Amino acid sequence: MSNPQFQFEALVRAHGPELYRVAFWLCRHRELAEDLVQETLLRAWRSIKDLREVSKIKAWLMIILRREHARIYERKQHEQVDIADLEIEDMSATPHAEQLATRELRNALGRLESKYREPLVMQVLGGFSIEEIAQALDLTPAAVMTQVFRAREKLKVMMNGKEGLNSPEKSA
């Protein structure tokens, strides 16, 4: 086994699960998330020689993943389901209250605008620092902090059932 191949396999083992987790939250489909990770790793393998700073490999992989995700939607429009009228049962009476709360949180995350959802998902699920997110999204750290703060505030409003007060059309 060659040295570059060994290094790349170590990279896949180290970052594959994080890539999948973020890919799943971006597209919310298991098979599509797996395809995104595979395509990301294939592109990374092909251009690993272009990586200048090994310490920033996580951010580099995340940039590739985001671009692959965007390419999917450039080529094909997926059917979208309106979940605005979705009613959630009283979770205290349900034995699977935690699963329902998780589903409600996922639905709320899905309703967030991409500019708020991506930095929040990268921070919470990907474990990225503000600086890494800023680099990956080509933003300033202050802009990332603002977007993460706003994402959390919008989620709080959605989860408390007061979505009409701060709908995306009314606030930026």
Image: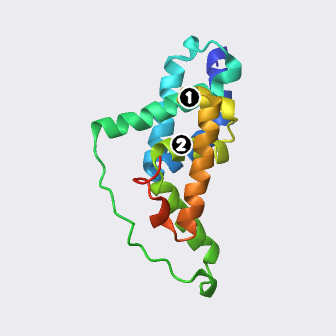
Q: Amino acid at mark 2?
A: Glu
Q: Position of residue 96 (x, y in %)?
A: 61, 78
Q: Which mark is residue 117?
A: none
Q: Quadrant of residue 99?
A: bottom right
Residue at left offset 64%, top offset 33%: 142
Residue indicated by mark 1: 139
Q: Residue furthest bottom?
A: 93
SS category of the residue bearing label 1:
loop
Q: Which residue is mark 2?
A: 118
Quadrant in which residue 147 is drawn? top right
Looking at the picture, does residue 46 appear above or below residue 70?
A: above
Please state which of residues 73 and 168 is positioned toward the viewer in this rendering: 168
Quadrant position of the N terminus in the picture: top right
State the residue in front, 88 or 69: 88
Residue 169 appears in the rendering: yes
* Res 101 quadrant in image: bottom right
Query: Mark 1 belongs to which amino acid?
Result: Leu
- Foreground label between 2 and 1: 1
Task: Kindly identify the residue that appears in the image at 63 percent across and 16 percent down.
Answer: 4
Residue 159 coordinates in the image, percent (x, y): 56, 67
10 on left or right of 107: right
Seen from the viewer's position, the closer of residues 141 and 170 is 170
User: Seen in the image, is 47 located left or right of residue 76?
Assistant: right
